[in-house]
Image (tube, helix red, strand yellow):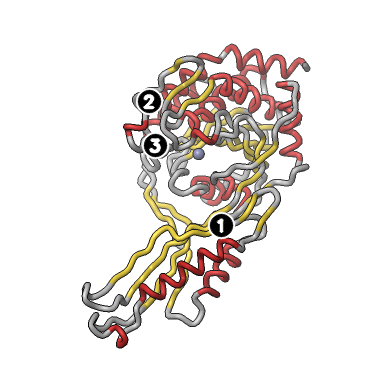
Amino acid sequence: MDKTAEKVLALAEKYRSATAENLARLVKLKSTSGKEQEVAAELQRQMREARFDSVRLDGLGSVHGRVGHGKRLLAIDAHIDTVDQGNLENWSEEPFSGRIRDGFVHGRGSVDQKGGAAAMVTAGRILKELGLPNELSVLFTGTVMEEDCDGLCWKYIIEEEKIRPEMVISTEPTALGIYRGQRGRMEMQVSFKGLSAHGSAPERGKNAIYMGAHACLEIEKLNEHLHHDDFLGKGSITVSEFVSGSPSLCAVADFARIHLDRRLTVGETKETALAEVRALVAGQPASVEVLAYREKAYTGKEYGMEKYYPTWTVERNHPAVTRAEGVFRQLFNKEARVDKWTFSTNGIAITGIHGIPCIGFGPGDEVMAHAPNEKIAIDDLVKASAFYALYALNMK
Ligand SMILES: [Zn+2]
């Protein structure tokens, strides 16, 4: 093993329990989307303790910790919000315990994805000790509101904070594989305008529920014929809600609306997905729209975006990916698994909207994400912290 990889691994090992304890502290602070204030404060404290060169909050309340003063910028991202606990009966212990036991840290957010946050803080600590290449800075971001609107925090960083790193490593769980893409998604709704009439004489009206019901069955068929990509798999569409309205329960319904969850594979865009649905309802009194997200961050700042989260991939032989494979080989003396996420990440804004290469490498298995009895192996945290540090050192 080369000398640098050896030093990095030794330091990651030295900080094993500090990393696990930092994660336990983050898990204990419940932080659903838009309520990340306390966990953001704790993450800043951990970055200061690790002697980062600067630590601050942006307008949305995401944490920005920097190591180094160079012009080239590598960003490493962990979102610090989590989903709620769900049904308590499915948990064998308290969801926010942050308990360290049997080589694991337990609790909601340990895998998705405060584990990544704790590992990257240790990476920053290692880089402070070993020193970065002069021309490089590393920005460690603890981002907010991801579970509610993936990518929004990074849209803000790029468009409002005017920060454009040359590439980003997402620390979302990959079970220590190197990920280079995900399917995109979008949320659409179709509204049908009917004509009400007395329920005793339905032939006088136009029932919007029937229009919506026909469209639902067409959408079920459409799902079978969507585009397939060898790497990301097939696009999909499903109806996730049906709402209707009528002047009375003794009247023909004059309104119906369906909500569509569309997953997009390579080659499918907002335009193609909209056109498919518009074609299904052509000639009917129906309107199709892409929904918008708009919420207040815990800082009070209101921000939003269209609910279109573009598909993204980074080429298999892109330097961001091959460098990651080299780092993995140096540290662990074997070949990395290169794959993709099933779920959606901040990559939709970083690469999908803004074309900045993003790769994933994270501790923990994505199957544990949003599941009860979530827990993460401390070994994964140690390996991930070594990986991030060596990745930065290999940016030369
Ligand atoms: Zn996540």
Lateral position of residue 280 relative to residue 2, left or right? left
Q: Earlier in the sequence, mark 2 or mark 3?
A: 2
Residue receiving disc 1: 236
Rendered location of residue 357, percent (x, y): 67, 45
The residue at 42%/28% (across/down) is 373
Lateral position of residue 340 relative to residue 239, left or right? right
Against 42, is 178 above or below?
Answer: below
- The quadrant the N terminus occupies is top right
Against 8, is 81 above or below?
Answer: below
Q: Earlier in the sequence, mark 3 or mark 1?
A: 3
Residue farthest to the front, as pictured: 200
Which amino acid, mark 1?
Ser
Residue receiving disc 3: 36
Q: Check disc 1 and report its element: helix, strand or loop.
A: strand
Q: Between marks 1 and 2, how big is the CA–CA gap?
A: 37 Å
Rendered location of residue 113, percent (x, y): 50, 33
Q: Check disc 3 and report its element: helix, strand or loop.
A: loop
**Mark identifier at residue 248:** none
- Which residue is more in the foreground, 150 or 231? 231
Against 173, is 378 above or below?
Answer: above
Q: Quadrant of residue 197?
A: bottom left
Lateral position of residue 77 relative to residue 93, left or right? right
Q: Between marks 2 and 3, how big is the CA–CA gap?
A: 12 Å
Which amino acid, mark 3?
Glu
Residue receiving disc 2: 28
